[in-house]
Image (spheres, grey):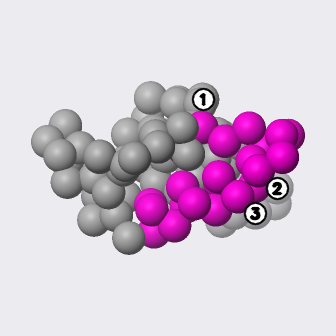
Amino acid sequence: MEWLERASCRGVADPDVFFPNRTAAGGARQLRAARAICAGCPVARQCLQWAVALEVQEGVCAGTTPEERLALRYFEARPTGRRLRRASC
């Protein structure tokens, strides 16, 4: 995982920004801050692949929340629309 060495989140002054409590005051602000850091990350794709593959259920990875990564896993596991149409005929 040498890509971690190039991650924009390395050395961030407040790593808690990647673990926002979205039900608390300021949680949405933390999420926006984490996403801003991830937006310029040169290894965001590798980070997202890692987080989805390992089913990381906490924190912001590559600008995504655990719920968004769950949706990605679901979407990737689904058969394509073309297969669904053929199966129903």
From the viewer's side, name the closer residue of 84 and 25: 25
Q: Residue at x 38, y 70 (%)?
A: 40
Secondary structure at badge 3 equals helix
Q: Sequence-wise, which precedes: disc 3 or disc 1?
A: 1
Left or right, residue 24 beside residue 54: right
Residue 41 is covered by the magenta coloring: no
Residue 49: x and y in percent read 39, 46
Q: Residue at x 44, y 60 (%)?
A: 38
Q: Residue at x 57, y 60 (%)?
A: 33
Left or right, residue 31 beside residue 14: right
Which residue position holds label 3? 85
* Tag nearer the camera, 3 or 1: 1
From the viewer's side, name the closer residue of 6 and 15: 15
Give the overall secondary structure of the magenta segment.
Answer: helix
Q: Can see residue 12?
A: yes
Question: Can you say whether 8 is above or below 22 in the image?
Answer: below
Which residue position holds label 1? 57
Which span of residues is magenta-colored?
18-39
Q: Are marks 2 and 3 in contact (CB under 8 Å)?
A: yes
Residue 88: x and y in percent read 82, 55
Which residue position holds label 2? 88
Secondary structure at badge 2 equals helix
